[in-house]
Structures are given as C-alpha cells and as structure tokens.
Image (cartoon, grey):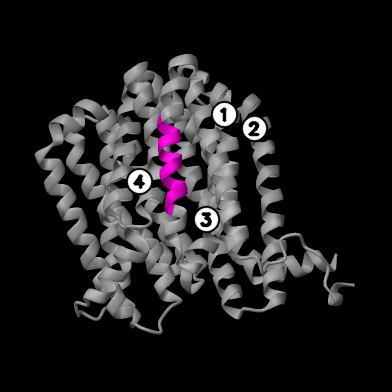
Amino acid sequence: MSKIRYLVRHSFFQKLSVYTISSYINRAIPFLILPVLTNYLSTNEYGEISMFLALMNLIMAIFGLSIDGAFMRKYYDSNKYTFSKVSFNYLLLSTTSFSLCLVLLALFKIPVAKYSGVPINYIIPSVICAFFTTICYCVNSLYQARGSASKYAIFTNGWTLLNASLSIIFVVAVGWGALGRVLGITISAVLFGTIGLFIVNRTGIKIQFDSDIIKEELSVFGIPSLPMNLRGTILQFTDKLFITNLISLSAAGIYTVGTQLSMVVEVFVRSIALAYVPWLYSKMSENKEDSNRKIVKLTYFLVVLIFTVSVLWIIFAKYGIVFFISSEYHEAIAYLFWLVLSQSFLGIQLLLVSFIYYSKRTKVYAIISTISIVLNIILNYVLIKEYGPLGAAVATAIVYCFMLLATAIIVFNMYKQFPWLLKKNKDDR
C-alpha cells in the first residue's frame, strides 16, 4: 500500500498521468471521428489523406532538422548560450529550411504527385502544414522541458479538437470529401502554429544571429538525426507507397485504418516518453549511483507496462472494434497484431534512445537508422508482393524489432556503469 501511495505522489507518475490522459484525448478525438470519416470517405479518398500525411511527415523529417528535440535539449544546457538567443536562431533556421522545401516542391510538384499518390493540389499545403506543425512541436518541447504538463495538455488537445471539428464540418456538413479533411488538418496547424510563435516569443527571444548555434544544431542534432527521422517517416511512408503502387490506393486506405487502430498503443508509449525524457535527463545530470539504479528500475517497469497494454488492446480491438468502423474497412483488423507489436518495440526504443540523445553521440545511432531504412524498403517490397498489405505490417514489426535490439546494444555499451542486471548493492540488502 505504501508503494502505491509513493507511486501516486511521485512527480514522474503525476506528470505521466497528465501526459497519458492528454495524449489519449489527443488521439481519441481523431479515433472517435474514425467511424464518421470511414462512412463519408471512400477507401480511395482515405488513401489520398494517408499519402498527404505521409508526405507531410517526410517533409518534417528532412527539413524539420530535429529542431523540436534540440529545443528541449538546449533548455537543459544553458552553459554556453542563453535560451532566448537559441530560440531565435532555431526559428530562423526552421523558416529558412521550410522555405527551401517550398521552392523545391513548387518546382517538382508534378513528379512528386505522380509517384507519391498525393493529389497535386495537396503538395503546397503539405509544406505549410509541416512548418507550422514543427512550431507546435517546439512549443510542446518547451512545456515538456519545463514540466508544464497541464499547459502541454491544453495546447495539444486544443489543436487536435480544432483539427477534428473543422474536418467534420468540411467532410460531413460541407461535403468536400478528402479535401475537407486536408483543410481541417492544415488550417488547425496554421492557427495553433501561429499561437505557438506568440508563446515562444513570450518566453523571451533575443534577436541576434549566432552562426555557432546554427552550426551546433546542424552538426549535433539536425544532420546526425536525419537518418533517424527519415527512418521513422520512411517506416510510415514506404509501406503505404508500395501498397499504393503494387496493389491500389484503396488498399492503402484500408491499411491506414489498421495503423490508426494501432495508434492507441502508440499514444500510450509516446505519453510515457513525454514524462520519461525530462525525468531521465534530470536524474542523469545528478551522476549518482543511486540515480542510475532508479533509472534502470523505472525503465524495466515501463517495458513490462508497454507489453501488457499492447496485449490488452489487441484482445479488445480484435473483437470490439468492428462495431465502430464501416464494414468496408474491416480487413484492417487482420493487420492489427503486427502493427501493435511494432508500436511496442517503438515504445521501448523511445525510452532507450533518450540515453543516446543525452550523450549527444547521435552519429553512432545514425548508422542503425540508415540500415533500418534499407532493410525496411527491401522487406516491404518483398513481403507486400508475396502477402499483400499483411506483408507491410510484418515488415514493419521486423524492422522495429531490429532497431530496438540495435539501440539496446548501443545504450548498454555506452552506459556500462549502469546496473542493467540490477545486482543488489550493500544498501539494498
């Protein structure tokens, strides 16, 4: 009983509860409108929306330069630069990067539309949406670093609620189909991204260009993290791209519903990471043996928790979710086991990769990310040709498992001083 009271009062678990509830509300809103969208959108239209989101995420992975992650890391590292100066230079770098992307896609939007399956009139909105979404993520990183879980929840859930509301209005009431959903996503990102700029400005922005800050962001976070960011995006993009080109856009739409159903677990693991990362950084900065032991114990506990939640969701979804989505999309249930397993591997990897980010030795991890990208492309092509969309789900699980094992090996060797085997010390006896 005393342990339960300790967990309830523990700052990590208090913040975790806020992040978890916030994340589930954030994901529950689009999940709850899933029955609406599947009844008002054809599988082809759902495929178009899926490819639009995939392109947007690909743009953020390449041109976002991991600025949101660097934003949080620099908040804890104020020895060399003031955070207000960092904020200005990061925003300047982000604006320049996405402007370059806008020019490139404006020039090559016809071939991009042809090979991606994204309608040509969605190309430019994908860039605009990617830029303002990155700003929103920076605000989330700021709140997360400060431990302002309630402000994080208000901002994130407000953004999602507006997204869902506009999408329902444009799709159901106005009848704009896939275009209505794209407009809902884009307009909500622009509005909350603009609000985010005001929030960052209120924290203090020192308008002073500093090439050292730009160079550090690019050399430590932006460029080394590019393979990692591409890995995550390509894992979400390649499967749908191959399904679209090897099978059909309609099949990609059904598969996307399967990935959205697995997002229940993704929300949970990412909400854990939101609370875990700032707690981990603060404990590691203490550089104490007792803190290291607490880190290992909590990490192992969270691993067990992630697998438990995953199993429970697979059981529930397999028998209950068919009542909530259109029969046209029921085939998506067949992909759920492998997709949820992938999310479990992802969740554990998110815990471990935080150790690498803290050390700033991201170049080592970039090699693993590059290998996973190649492996993902090969497996998707081979397995989709052999087993259809189910092959994409299996390929995703295999690649995520590979990344988890590789990350674990790197972290365990990088932090050999940590009691990974949890051998009892004298104080524990």
**Dot 2 alpha-carbon crowd within 10 angstroms: few under 14, some 14 to 19, many 20 or more:** many
Sequence-first tag of 2 and 3: 3
Q: Where residue 119 appears, x then y in whole percent?
A: 21, 29
Element marked by disc 4? helix
Sequence-first tag of 4 and 3: 3
Sequence-first tag of 1 and 4: 4
Residue at left 35%, top 37%? Answer: 168
Q: Nearer the viewer, residue 392 or 29?
A: 392
**Dot 4 alpha-carbon crowd within 10 angstroms: few under 14, some 14 to 19, many 20 or more:** many
Q: Nearer the viewer, residue 223 or 48?
A: 223
Q: Where residue 253 appears, x then y in whole percent?
A: 39, 25
For the N terminus, give its image quadrant: bottom right
Q: Looking at this rendering, what residue extends furthest in the right direction? A: 429
Q: Nearer the viewer, residue 174 or 43?
A: 43
- The reply to whether discs 4 and 2 touch (Cβ–Cβ < 8 Å) is no
**Dot 1 alpha-carbon crowd within 10 angstroms: few under 14, some 14 to 19, many 20 or more:** many
Residue type of the residue flagged with mark 3 = Ser
Residue type of the residue flagged with mark 4 = Asn
Q: Which residue is mark 1?
A: 336
Q: Which residue is mark 2?
A: 314
Q: Which mark is residue 22?
A: 3
- The reply to whether discs 2 and 3 touch (Cβ–Cβ < 8 Å) is no
